[in-house]
Amino acid sequence: MDSARPSALTPFALLALLALGSVASAQATFTVVGPGRAADVSPDGAFVVGTDAGGAFLWSASGLVSLGQDVAVAVSDDGAVVFGNMTDASGDSFAGRWTAGTGWVPVGELSGNSGSSVSSGYDMSGDGDTATGLGWNSASDGAAFLYQSGSTTPLPQVGSGSHRGNAVSGDGRVIGGWDEGPTGARLATLWDASLAQTFPFVDAAVNPDGVGEVSALSTDGTWAARFASPNTGRTQGAIWSAATGTVYLGEGPPTGSFFDRGFALGVTDDGGVAVGAWGAPPFNLSGTIWTPGGGLVLFDDFLAANGATGAAGWDVLSVDAITPDGSTLVGTAAPAGQPFPASWFIATVDTSLGTNYCTAVPNSTGLAGVMSAMGSDAVAANNVELRASSLPQGQFGIFVVSMTQGLTTNIPNNVGNLCLGGTIGRYQDLSQIFSTGASGSGTLAIDLAAVPMGPVLVATMPGDTLNFQAWHRDVVGGAATSNFTDGLEILFD
């Protein structure tokens, strides 16, 4: 499961918003859907795949569809392609792709097999065209495979033992997995678009060989998640980017077994949230969620702190996938105090901020522009992303801010209403100007320590109220003009 693929929302970090004791405006829901285990969720949260007593399943709001084979591990962004494992009429098992038109089709065959196993599927890209897993060159030589556009080839390797692909980035350009080192340990590995191989989790201090496995990737492969192996010298799950190096997620809670270790199974596109589990499988696992501000906490505690209904009487065993923006999570739970029977759940996090005010004048699309924000209203979290939507395509705009509301109409070359008063700041640096593109929207992550107020930058303080609006270019009746969204008021703690 790559667990992080493109979505309509630009990814944001939940940061301290998710930390126990510093929850600001997040609200969570928790729904146990049915028996079995979830493996992957589409970026918009509309499709989930996994495995139950009947084999592979595909779930959507329309209901659950049994796919009639062994295991489902990944789903395409549109829910049209499912990747997993299947058994053919002769009893041989393969990695396989499912569509409604073709049913299951085996992929992943290399040059050999190990008993009845020919290949195993582990993950697939968002468009369903690229996949990876384990194939066999011989009964004792397992190899990572790349399936792409109908063709299966082995991935290159530096080591001389087995290797395996575990994860594909949403855009299909990066593959993660492991390569067997000289001592037999699995070394966490990445293959880029040219299939060049690197070992990202090398840490000279505690993990000089980079032991572990890459388990999940962000949409563009910038972030990799890793779960620990017993012989790493570091039992923690971790995430990695070229900019940050290895970021360890921490140990526990709970601890109590020599064999306990961390599993990072999903990461958001900005690296701000990682999910997974802690413990010693198969009977001692607890689902976890990590943020930079909150550290590693039990997902059960996170749900309770965020007022999730439906979680009472359940223990979360693992959080197996997360959408790119962190808003939807799927995983496995069991009745409280029992490691089984397993059921799968969907959890959501609402991190919308502020209160809309003022009336926007419809733009050339016939719709009124809408101002919104995501993240945390805690100043300490410094985690706010502004969003303007329902705008005309292919235009540029900027966000504006003030500590005062107002109403100004009849602005020259503008058909809209300015809903700000007093001193007005503009996010107008080249890096801050947005283009609405094909989506008719624009976003900007802002720094609360440097909010423009006229010609100066001001630090936001707890108790401050900021009012935001977006100005954008438009063309009405062939004439160039401009317009505004409605206003958004955010009170910060």
Image: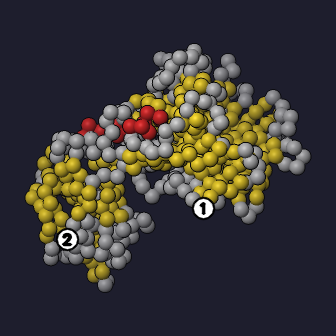
- Looking at the image, the residue that sits furthest to the left is 422
Q: Is residue 475 visible?
A: yes
Q: Is residue 151 visible?
A: no
Residue at position x 69%, y 21% in the image: 184
Q: Is residue 192 above or below residue 277?
A: below
Find residue 151 and report its horizontal and vertical position in percent: 74, 52
Front residue (pair 431, 310): 310
Which residue is labeled 1 in the image?
62
Residue at position x 33%, y 39% in the image: 23
Which quarter shows the N terminus?
A: top right
- Looking at the image, the residue that sits furthest to the bottom is 477
Find residue 316 and report its horizontal and vertical position in percent: 54, 35
Q: How many marks?
A: 2
Cβ–Cβ below 8 Å for labels 1 and 2? no
Find residue 364 and report its horizontal and vertical position in percent: 33, 77
Side of 421 where 307 appears, left or right: right
Label 2: how many Cα within 10 Å (few below 14, some 14–19, many 20+): many
Q: Amino acid at mark 1?
A: Ser
- Looking at the image, the residue that sits furthest to the front is 313
Residue at position x 62%, y 30% in the image: 339
In the structure shown, which secondary structural element does the residue marked by tag 1 occupy? loop
Q: Is residue 96 above or below residue 210?
A: below
Q: Is residue 55 above or below residue 427?
A: above
Residue at position x 13%, y 64% in the image: 406
Which residue is labeled 2 in the image?
417
Front residue (pair 347, 143): 347
Residue 391 sits in which quadrant? Answer: bottom left
Tell me how the rendering is colored.
secondary structure
Q: Amino acid at mark 2?
A: Asn
Q: Is residue 298 above or below residue 28?
A: above
Side of 13 where 36 appears, left or right: right
